[in-house]
Image (spheres, rainbow, N blue to C red):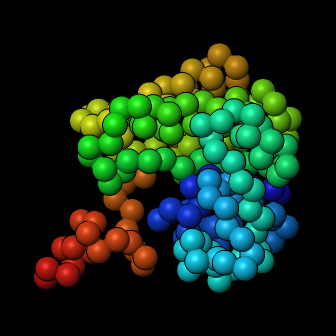
Amino acid sequence: MRILVTGATGFIGQHLVPLLAQMPDTAVSILALEQFSHADLTPLPPALAAIREQFHIVYADLRNFRLTVRALAETEPDHVIHLAAVGVTDPFMSIDTALRHNLNGTINLIRACFEKNHTTKQLIVARSSGEPSNLNVYAASKAAAWNFCRMFARTQGWTIHGAMIFQAYGPGQSPSNLIPAAMQAA
């Protein structure tokens, strides 16, 4: 099985990739926006740098459809786990940034998975518990992206699933987030 993970250097991704890398007969690739040289792994979170030889890195910007298609052609994933997003901790993120990354990036990934790549069987998209409220730009952009996922699944028959993630926490999380801050205050 071949799995491609977007957003692997984020909080959830840096915990998921090591677990996927332990699965037998599984080749894990991560789609990274930044260039990580083999000599300098400092931009990689420690959990990923420690297992660097257990996964492949492909570089692409989901905002660029051609680069996204190229990344999928290089990795030929059976399954894609889409965790990449911007603005989860930025209530003042600009609308343009949210739309380019969270909406257009997701649409580019969906199209690259199913229109251009004939190996992808399933796309799992991380969803946000804030989507139903649309109280900020991040939540609204994630809700819009999910609506496109649902539309493509219904009209094209593509296998797209949503994983609604509620208050993820654990080692490596920023101390300014709710649960670490509450634990520190206690």
Q: Say which residue appears at 73% left-offset and 40% top-offset.
A: 67
| Residue farthest to the left, as pictured | 186
* Left or right of 143 on screen, residue 146: right
**Can you say whether 20 is above or below 84 in the image?**
below
x, y (%) of residue 60?
Answer: 69, 48
Q: Is residue 129 above or below residue 65?
A: below
- In terms of depth relative to the viewer, which is nearer, 115 or 49? 49
- Determine if residue 160 is in view: no
- Quadrant where the N terminus lies? bottom right
Query: Is residue 133 visible from the viewing direction of this image?
Result: yes
Query: How many marks are shown on the rendered structure?
Result: 0
- Give the residue at x 20% y 81%: 184
Which residue is situated farthest in the top direction here?
155
Q: Residue at x 27, y 37 (%)?
A: 136
Across and down, in percent, residue 110 comes to 66, 33
Q: Is residue 48 above or below residue 92?
A: below
Query: Which quadrant of the figure has residue 115?
Result: top right
Left or right: 96 in relation to 16: left
Residue at 80%, 42% in the rendered image: 70
Q: Quadrant of the C terminus?
A: bottom left
Q: Is residue 161 left or right of residue 31?
A: left
Q: Position of residue 53 (x, y in %)?
A: 78, 77
The image quarter containing residue 32 is bottom right
Which x, y percent locates residue 105? 57, 36
